[in-house]
């Protein structure tokens, strides 16, 4: 990890963002275990470096197409964690007025064009946003985050072809955590690196260590700058792992059968822990400063938990608003 060349300010921002995501989701998992949460949530734990690194390279008015595993994308864009928590508990002041839950958090003020329960749907949405940018002649960029399984969907191939042919300002980020629910990507794709598929569309394809926030940031920055300058899309594959099952209710026994050490091996590369260790080795952030950062975030998280719990459920009449008739 290249922390040596980074300023204390930048490293602090990376750490704060990743730590906030991690603590946020630990509380979401608790909600589920306590039976407080209607429905499910797909946790981003383990993948924090990806959204953090990519979003650090964006401007405020850029767009994001997010997924069913979207908490990290929202936190990285500075979304209000109180409103996120309230949404997850189905409460009135949640981002989608409590009607969408974890998989349908929309935060247009942060450029988030919606989390999405339909696998692969965020790819044409972000591509469409990139088309609108080109059409309007602004210097914005659209990011599409999606999993490796989504790269087997037709939407992936159609979008990359169109974005390449029209040189659209979009960057495609594959969060390759190896499994699509319980299906191992190695059983359903005959390529080692999905980034290789970029060559079929005449665009750059890059593989990065998705556990290293500095590597993700540097690669994303190059691709984003390239898109902003009108040179078209890039496909970036981030190799990563999710700590939990596919969703909060999945014990992920399929992983244990394949390789008992797999989770342990990946957890040693924890993006939050590794950044903390590297920043300490290079004396960029002291132990006392880390304690202060963590205490500040803990306070924010506890406030969000309390807000979400105390926030009322929406009025029953709300079920008739914001719907197509
Ligand atoms: C179009 C569609 N097909 C299938 C599903 C069911 N489904 C939900 S998540 C998922 C796996 C997604 O895997 P991936 O894209 O790699 O993302 P990850 O969950 O690993 O982050 C599937 C098949 C769905 N929601 N939408």
Image (cartoon, grey):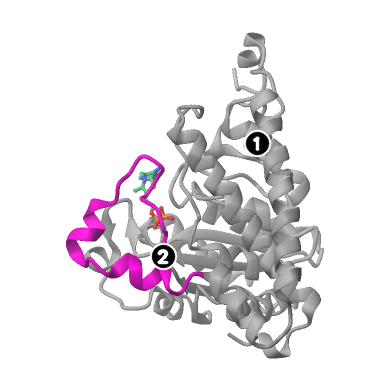
The structure residue drawn at horizontal position 57% and vertical position 68%, both measured from the top left corner, is: 272
Q: Quadrant of the N terminus?
A: bottom right
Q: Looking at the image, do the residues carrying marks 2 and 1 touch, with CB atoms under 8 Å apart?
A: no
Q: Position of residue 157 (x, y in %)?
A: 43, 63
Q: Residue at x 48, y 62 (%)?
A: 46
- Residue at 39 percent of width and 71 percent of height: 266
271 shown above or below 4: above
User: Can residue 246 be seen at all in this image of the molecule?
Assistant: yes
**Which part of the image, by quadrant, shows the C terminus?**
top right
- The majority secondary structure of the magenta stretch comes to loop
Residue at figure coordinates x 55%, y 67% from the top left: 172
Tell me, yes or no, whether the highlighted magenta stretch contains residue 261. yes
Q: Nearer the viewer, residue 54 or 136?
A: 54
Label 1 Cα crowd, 10 Å radius (few <14 / some 14-19 / many 20+): many
The correct choice, above or below, for 67 with respect to 281 in the image is above
78 and 265: which one is in front? 265
In this figure, which residue is indicated by the disc labeled 1? 305
Dot 2: within a 10 Å radius of its alpha carbon, few (fewer than 14), some, or many (20 or more) residues? many
Q: Is residue 96 visible?
A: no
The circle on residue 188 is none
State which region is magenta. 241-270
Q: In this view of the protein, which residue sits in the foreground, 102 or 306?
A: 306
Q: Is residue 26 left or right of residue 181?
A: right
Residue marked by disc 2 = 241
Q: Quadrant of residue 129?
A: bottom right
Q: Is residue 101 left or right of residue 285?
A: left
Ligand 1 under 8 Å from disc 2 Cβ: no
Which badge, 2 or 1, is on the more N-terminal residue? 2
Q: Position of residue 154 (x, y in %)?
A: 39, 56
């Amino acid at each position: 990890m290249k922390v040596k060349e980074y300023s204390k300010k930048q490293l602090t921002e990376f750490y704060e963002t990743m730590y906030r995501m991690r603590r946020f989701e630990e509380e979401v998992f608790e909600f589920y275990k306590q039976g407080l949460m209607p429905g499910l949530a797909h946790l981003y734990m383990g993948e924090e470096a990806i959204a953090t690194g990519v979003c650090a390279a964006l401007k405020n008015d850029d767009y994001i197409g997010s997924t069913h595993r979207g908490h990290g994308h929202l936190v990285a864009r500075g979304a209000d964690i109180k409103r996120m928590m309230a949404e997850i508990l189905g409460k009135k002041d949640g981002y989608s007025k409590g009607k969408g839950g974890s998989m349908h958090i929309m935060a247009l003020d942060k450029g988030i064009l919606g989390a999405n329960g339909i696998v692969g749907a965020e790819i044409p949405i972000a591509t469409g946003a990139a088309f609108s940018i080109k059409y309007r002649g602004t210097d914005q960029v659209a990011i599409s985050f999606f999993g490796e399984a989504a790269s087997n969907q037709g939407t992936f191939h159609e979008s990359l072809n169109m974005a390449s042919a029209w040189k659209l300002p979009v960057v495609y980020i594959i969060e390759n955590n190896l499994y699509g629910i319980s299906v191992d990507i190695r059983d359903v794709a005959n390529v080692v690196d999905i980034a290789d598929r970029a060559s079929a569309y005449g665009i750059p394809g890059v593989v990065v260590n998705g556990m290293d926030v500095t590597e993700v940031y540097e690669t994303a920055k190059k691709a984003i700058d390239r898109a902003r300058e009108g040179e078209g899309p890039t496909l970036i594959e981030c190799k990563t792992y999710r700590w939990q099952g596919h969703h909060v209710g999945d014990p992920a026994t399929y992983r244990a059968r394949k390789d008992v050490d797999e989770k342990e091996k990946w957890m040693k590369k924890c993006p939050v822990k590794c950044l903390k260790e590297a920043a300490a080795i290079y004396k960029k952030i002291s132990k006392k400063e880390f304690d202060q950062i963590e205490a500040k975030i803990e306070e924010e998280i506890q406030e969000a938990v309390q807000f979400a719990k105390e926030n009322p459920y929406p009025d029953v009449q709300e079920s008739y608003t914001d719907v197509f008739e």
